[in-house]
Image (spheres, grey):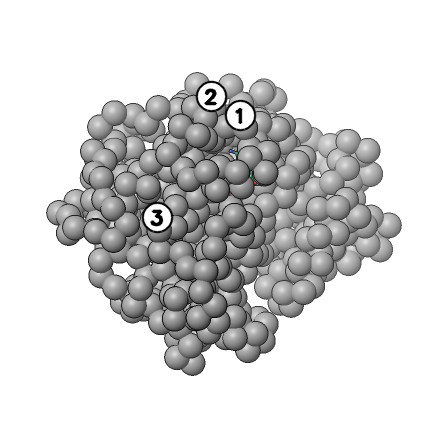
Amino acid sequence: MRFDELGLAPELLRAVSDQGYATPTPIQAQAIPIVLAGRDLMGGSQTGTGKTAAFSLPLLQRILPLASASPSPARHPVRVLMLAPTRELAIQVYESVKLYSKYIPIRSCCVFGGVDIKPQFEEVRRGIEILVATPGRLLDLVEHRCVNFNQVQALVLDEADRMLDMGFIPDVTRIIQLLPPQRQNLLFSATFSEDIRKLADKMLTSPALVEVARRNTISEMITHRIHPVAAREKHALLTQLLQSPELDQALVFTGTKIETRRLARELQRAGISADSIHGDKTQQERLKALKAFKSGETRVLVATDVAARGLDIDDLPHVINYELPRTPEDYIHRIGRTGRAGRHGTAISLVSAEEFQYLASIEKLIKLEIEQVIVPGFEREDDFAASSTGKRSGSPAPEKSSRRQAAAKIREKKSRTETGDAVKAGFDFSKPYEYVEPASGLLAPAVDVSPKEHPPRARRPVAVLLGGIGKISD
Ligand code: AMP
């Protein structure tokens, strides 16, 4: 499959070629024709799979006939609204849209909170066809009456699962109520929880379903490793691991902003160039930290789940879970920062006795028994002894029986390479740049819909479609 076989306009093909993209990624090959046809779409895809171009290119093409060279703001109404959960992701999406639209007279801009609203206000007022926004700031603009949604033809909800986690769904629902009812809707999510199904059911009409990964599977390009360690020894172990020349750069996840700050400071004191990224930092500080990390100036970036969401860091070799996430889906999000675009990556987790309960649910979700490696000097037994006598505080104590089971499990487990299991279990997230034919029956038949006509269609519960996927992936 080549880009020029997808029916895209020459100006868009030229922009794509400028980016050096040789072939469409699977999500692009599958989604672009569907979006061009005007259909609603549910995309199961994480960042790193090329999903931004998968929705931006066809939407740019759909509004291209309405493009105007006139300077008048009235000739540039908002036609496409793209919602993203974080400012980092919103900026990334916007930057991609700008690149893809460089040869066409379509204007775009990006609005997000945490910065002065005035310049955003001015930019929107000058007239823009594509508005990329975080939900809260968009509602601020609505309250200031500086944005009009009358001409909106398409809505994109990116990383819907994260929107849900961050509590943005009420805001998104409010925004949807302000849009014209006749419009195209695209929803992207890395995971499909019950809540996402409900949201998709409400938002989408007879959607096509495109998935480049089986639900909750992981890349075979990633090697996973666990280091069992007493909670109080984690810092020493991390510092020791980071002394290894192999661990040249790593994104380190912690559970809280406070821990993120503290850990970055401690690493700096140990002579390791480290910075942190979390919700309390200003936009400028976050972008600065990200830039220094991307350039290699900073070796270690310590992040919370929320701040790291949507970070597009090419060639990130290592992700370290300083603390295991409480939600198993977050493990998938975290490790999805490495092993991208066909490159190898390592996901290392420092796991204390109290955290083995979370490990069990992660392994269950990813259908993988992760290799456990004890680093000499960081043996685990005393940690288990301490936790089973209830001495430890601050962390949730597992049930006695499950604690025993967890301890027994560690002893029983033998080191083994796990990636083969993921491969056996299904397809294909591991090979994001290999085209995969959509499973027959999953996609409702495509219909030809011109940009202005969007005939009403019978609603069809998305849950039915997703149920179908569930069967395949089980
Ligand atoms: P996304 O999943 O949209 O965040 O994209 C991840 C990365 O893949 C970005 O750096 C894009 O520039 C890149 N990308 C998108 N499409 C392609 C393609 N067809 N070929 C190569 N790289 C791509």
For the residues labelled 1 and 3, the Cα–Cα distance comes to 36 Å
Report whether 135 appears left or right of 246: left
Name the spot of residue 434 as percent of width and height, x first.
Answer: 47, 24
- Residue where numbered disc 2 is placed: 423
| Residue 425 percent coordinates (x, y) | 41, 22
Residue depicted at 62% across the width and 49% down the height: 253
Observer able to see residue 264: yes
Marks 1,2: beta carbons within 8 A: yes
The numbered disc on residue 62 is: 3
Secondary element type, mark 2: helix
Q: Nearer the viewer, residue 369 or 127?
A: 127
Against 365, residue 202 (above or below) is: below
Give the residue type that dot 3 points to.
Arg
Q: Secondary structure at mark 3?
A: helix
Residue 14: % across, % down: 52, 38
Mark 2 → mark 3, Cα distance in angstroms: 37 Å
Query: Given the image, on which type of amino acid does mark 1 rest?
Result: Glu
Quarter occupied by the N terminus = top left
- What residue is shown with label 1? 220
| Disc ID at residue 123 | none
Q: Is residue 1 left or right of residue 292?
A: left
Q: Position of residue 131 (x, y in %)?
A: 44, 61
Q: Count all numbered tags in the image, as a single digit.
A: 3
Amino acid at pointer 2: Val
**Regarding ligand 1, which quadrant of the image does it lie in?**
top right
- Crowding at dot 2, Cα within 10 Å, few <14 / some 14-19 / many 20+, comes out as some
Mark 1, secondary structure of its residue? loop
Residue shown at 17% from the left, 45% from the top:
460
Residue at x-position 31% and y-position 38%: 34
The residue carrying pointer 1 sits among few (fewer than 14), some (14 to 19) or many (20 or more) residues within 10 Å by Cα, namely many
Q: CA distance from mark 1 to mark 2?
A: 6 Å
